[in-house]
């Protein structure tokens, strides 16, 4: 019976591979270059099965040949399928390779080298030191584990300590393990999906050369680090589903198997935070930092948010400073430090931090929008209305579909007794967000100031209908 089930799973995977293959659409225009065509002949979709509580799910990602019989991908792509074989397939051909085992892996760097039965066409790995900031690069892979696609972007930064790359490339689930290539089709890195979104080709070479034998999948899956990943991924699913207690249980099991993994502590801390267990959350964020203090800027940031919430302002600023020291071009820590300084009525310091957040997040529309709004609000508190209007106008130009920018600009106009102008902004906010209770409340106040008492009452009543606590 077990053998029959195993064969059934294999046929299921093969059948899905073929059905996805026949559903392929014409390739993107980016694929016309010779270099991108090379990548197409070497980039594969990886698919296997995941068993959870007797239910079978498909899991996978992208990989690419680095030698005739070896494929590079992410550790989490290799660890995702928990039962049965893993298969690799090109997007435009029917050739299928079966993964024999794992040649080498690095869970911390999220990389793995898989050994295949048969041969494919390997891509050339080039030294990352040949790259330049602003250079155009390409990401080849299977977003959402379906159609092969290539997108382009530029290199924004190369981190000095490990040569990891930060780019403007757009990636989606399924792009995990995708090759990042130059215009010649040479590999410059492997996509890992973090803030610095690619490990350099140098790291792939080092991993490839670190082993001399293949470990069968069945044996590799028994390793603590792999089992920890399985618990972690199930915890993430519980977390996204809102089952916080279930998430904490899975993260706790993952931490038992891999006690030095900061991400397990950090996500468990976020779950505890959502449950109101602030002390437990801070303890987990602290443990994440202890496990690897040199890379966990996000743990400092998350701990800073909780310290801010519990009014430990000095501790929160210290954590923001440490987060910024580790990652000086992440806007969130500057914005958070700015919020803390507002609470401390250090408006000049807050404006400085929001300005820095804008400077480092110019390509991050939501982050830049929020920084302009926050800086505008601080300028309004400081009676710098010209500066406030400049910031609100910039925020609205960046994200004209967001109601809050119009509300804040309307409040500034109301401060200056331009009630008609304020009503115009409130009208736009309500048009964009008809269930925004405060929009009606503010508009009612502006109408009342103009003597339009009947119209104001209608707005006040509407605000109360949506949210009885508005205006209390």
Image (spheres, rainbow, N blue to C red):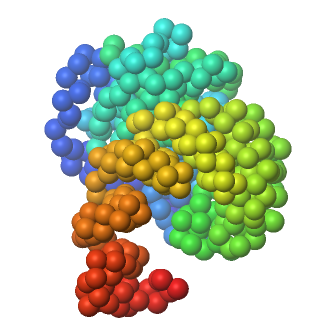
> Residue 103 location, x and y as percent?
62, 30
In the figure, is residue 197 to the left or right of 421? right
Residue sitting nearer the eye, 278 or 107: 278
> Residue 407 location, x and y as percent?
37, 64
In the figure, is residue 266 to the left or right of 14? right
Q: Quadrant of residue 277?
A: bottom right
Residue at the farthest top position: 130
Q: Quadrant of residue 168?
A: top left
Q: How many marks?
A: 0
> Residue 84 location, x and y as percent?
54, 53
Q: What residue is rendered at 32% in x and 90% in y?
A: 457
Query: Does any portion of residue 175 appear in the rendered image?
Result: no
Query: Does any portion of residue 140 appear in the rendered image?
Result: yes
Instruction: Reply above or below: 222 against 435.
Output: above
Instruction: Reply above or below: 260 against 115.
Output: below
Q: What residue is rendered at 43% in x and 26% in y?
A: 180
Q: What residue is rendered at 52% in x and 38% in y?
A: 355
Instruction: Reply above or below: 265 against 32.
Output: below
Q: Quadrant of residue 394?
A: top left
Residue sitting nearer the eye, 453 or 305: 453
> Residue 210 location, x and y as percent?
69, 21
In the figure, is residue 167 to the left or right of 324? left
Q: What residue is rendered at 70% in x and 63% in y?
A: 309
Residue at the farthest left position: 26
Residue sitting nearer the eye, 327 or 432: 432
Residue sitting nearer the eye, 456 or 428: 456
Q: Quadrant of the N terminus?
A: bottom right
């Amino acid at each position: 019976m077990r053998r029959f089930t195993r064969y059934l799973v294999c046929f299921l995977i093969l059948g899905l591979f073929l059905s996805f293959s026949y559903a392929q659409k014409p390739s993107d225009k980016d694929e016309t270059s010779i270099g991108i065509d090379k990548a197409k002949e070497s980039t594969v979709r990886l698919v296997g099965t995941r068993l959870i509580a007797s239910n079978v799910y498909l899991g996978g990602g992208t990989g690419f040949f680095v030698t005739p019989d070896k494929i590079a991908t992410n550790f989490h792509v290799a660890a995702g399928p928990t039962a049965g074989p893993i298969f690799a397939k090109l997007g435009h051909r029917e050739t299928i390779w079966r993964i024999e085992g794992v040649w080498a892996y690095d869970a911390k760097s999220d990389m793995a080298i898989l050994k295949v039965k048969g041969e494919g066409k390997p891509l050339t790995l080039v030294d990352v030191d040949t790259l330049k900031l602003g250079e155009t690069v390409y990401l080849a892979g299977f977003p959402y584990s379906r159609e092969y696609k290539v997108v382009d972007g530029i290199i924004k930064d190369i981190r000095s300590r490990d040569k990891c790359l930060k780019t403007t490339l757009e990636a989606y689930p399924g792009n995990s393990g995708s090759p990042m290539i130059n215009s010649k089709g040479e590999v410059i890195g492997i996509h890992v999906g973090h803030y610095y979104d690619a490990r350099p080709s140098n790291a792939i070479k080092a991993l490839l050369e670190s082993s001399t034998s293949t470990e069968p999948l069945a044996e590799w899956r028994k390793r603590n680090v792999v089992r920890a990943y399985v618990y972690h991924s199930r915890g993430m699913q519980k977390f996204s589903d809102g089952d916080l207690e279930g998430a904490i249980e899975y993260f706790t099991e993952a931490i038992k198997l891999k006690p030095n993994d900061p991400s397990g502590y950090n996500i468990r801390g976020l779950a505890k935070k959502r449950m109101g267990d602030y002390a437990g959350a801070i303890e987990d964020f602290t443990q994440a930092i202890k496990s690897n203090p040199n890379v966990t800027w996000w743990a400092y940031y998350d701990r800073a948010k909780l310290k801010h919430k519990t009014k430990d302002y000095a501790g929160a600023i210290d954590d923001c400073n440490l987060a910024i020291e580790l990652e000086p071009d992440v806007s969130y820590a500057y914005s958070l430090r700015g919020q803390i300084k507002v609470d401390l009525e250090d408006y000049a310091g807050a404006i400085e931090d929001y300005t820095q957040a804008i400077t480092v997040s110019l390509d991050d529309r939501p982050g830049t929008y929020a920084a302009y709004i926050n800086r505008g609000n601080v300028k309004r508190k400081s009676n710098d209305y010209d500066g406030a209007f400049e910031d609100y106008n910039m925020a609205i130009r960046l994200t004209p579909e967001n109601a809050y920018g119009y509300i804040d600009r309307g409040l500034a106009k109301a401060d200056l007794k331009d009630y008609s102008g304020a009503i115009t902004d409130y009208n736009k906010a309500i048009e964009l967000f008809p269930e925004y209770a405060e929009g009606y409340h503010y508009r009612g106040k502006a109408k009342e100031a103009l003597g339009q008492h009947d119209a104001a009452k209608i707005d006040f009543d509407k605000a109360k209908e949506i949210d009885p606590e508005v205006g209390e």
